[in-house]
Image: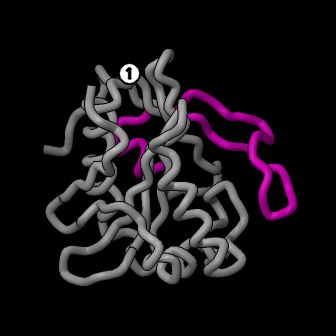
Amino acid sequence: MTDLTAFPALATERLWLREIVDADAPALFAIQGNAQVMRWFGSDPLADETAALMLIRTFASWRNLVNPGTRWGLELKEREGLVGSCGLFSWNRLWRKCTVGYELVPEATGSGLMTEALQAVLDWGFEHMHVNRIDAQIHPDNERSIKLARKLGFVEEGRLREIGFWGGRHHDMLQFSLLRREWQSGD
């Protein structure tokens, strides 16, 4: 089994997928403090850069948990600074499954960057975490994310009624999954 305590940096044609570090707090706050970006994410926007720093430390701690996860910062190879993040979390080793989550800055939306990043992340999850299933829960109104999940081969399984709570109200989420045997690597 792969050493999952060392951060698994990845690269794609246009992106570095790297560990999110303390110096990224302003960029992470610009993304996850943006109410527009976070409206579908499943949590309220970050309040300030201190909250971003705490979140970065939470991401770092995931690799040491019983059900760990990994959150990659997405950085364009042509310039420094985060344009988003994506990750695999809630890893249940016994059931061989985990969940994927992701977000991009608004100006990068529609560029294919998240497709590129997730192809690398899903490859890594199936190969190194040895999962058989990767889940995604997507807000029913998040048409771009639903389209992306389907493009990557995720199958919609149903609606989870009022499973999420953010923005002061309950939200339904659509349950998607991708099985190892269904995955077609982007390579």
Counting from the top left corner in percent of width and height, residue 58 is at 57, 56
Q: Which residue is mark 1?
A: 132
Vertical side of 99 occupied by 48: above or below: below
Q: How is the image coloured?
A: one colour
Left or right of 87, for residue 175 = right
Residue at coordinates 62% horizontally, 78% vertically from top-left? 34
Residue at coordinates 67% horizontally, 80% vertically from top-left? 48
Residue at coordinates 35% horizontally, 36% vertically from top-left? 153
Q: Nearer the viewer, residue 39 or 22?
A: 22
Quadrant that contains the C terminus:
top left
Q: Quadrant of residue 49?
A: bottom right
- Label 1: state its secondary structure: loop
Residue 155 can be seen in this image: no
Vertical side of 82 occupied by 88: above or below: above
**Which SS does the magenta portion mostly show?**
strand
**Residue at the right extreme, as displayed:** 168
Left or right of 132, for residue 60 = right
Total marks placed: 1
Residue at coordinates 41% horizontally, 65% vertically from top-left? 20
Q: Which residues are magenta?
A: 146-175
Give amino acid for label 1.
Answer: Asn
